[in-house]
Amino acid sequence: MTRGVSTRKIVIDGNSIPQRANSGFITAFNAIWGSSNYDMVNIAVGGQNTDDVLTRLPKYAFAESLAYGEMIYVLHEIRNQIKDGTTPADELTKIQNVFSQIKALNTNILTVCVLTSASLTTSGDAGSALLTDIPICNGLIAAESSGYIDLKIDLYNYSTFDDPFSSVFSDYVHYSSSGITQYTNYIANEINDNLL
């Protein structure tokens, strides 16, 4: 979905979490910039992982970024593949590949990595690798210093999203309506305050 006509373009990518938050992102960015001061497209796809993001990047017309005075690519870091045995170190490599490809397309694209929040598959997963591997993976990405990522937003260490049993979650992974509002407002404000 695209909103507004502007010299600023925002691309939202990831899995079902940002995909479900599309209207929340529009509301959050409208509140900061106004509806006519940016364009936004959400290319996130539910159920996908970082390998899928790498596969579809060449298909997306990032060349159009040349027509914008400013382009921001936002990836909600994906841990779906943890069930397939992907280690935090492997995920870091995948993330680096995504952002290095973005910068190779256009070095002026501003890049944002949203480090994923606590999550479970079911209420009985309290001891699962999801809870132990996510903060390890986030720490590796946060310490990444190659210059490919311009802003890192750590949801896990933001107290609202560190407990998958809290009311901001609807099913231990995805956010409730109130959670989506807090999620999108937090990201929009972090971008406005710490990237632009």
Image (cartoon, rainbow, N blue to C red):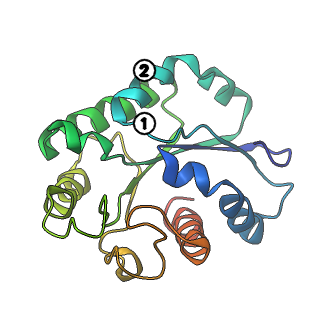
Furthest toward the top, the residue is: 59
Task: Give the foreground label among 1 and 2.
Answer: 1
Q: Are marks 1 and 2 in contact (CB under 8 Å)?
A: no
Name which residue lies at 37% across and 48% down. 77
The residue to which callout 2 is attached is: 55
Name which residue lies at 27% across and 33% down. 94
Q: Is residue 185 left or right of residue 137?
A: right
Q: Quadrant of residue 31?
A: bottom right
Task: Residue 125 in the image: state x and y as whole percent.
Answer: 21, 64
Task: Residue 161 in the image: state x and y as whole percent.
Answer: 38, 74
Give the mark nearest the N terminus, 1 or 2: 1
Q: Is residue 186 left or right of residue 8?
A: left
> What is the distance, in whole Å, between disc 1 and disc 2 at their CAs?
11 Å
| Badge 1 amino acid | Gln
Q: Nearer the viewer, residue 103 or 89?
A: 89
Q: Which mark is residue 48?
A: 1
- Residue 184 at least partly seen: yes
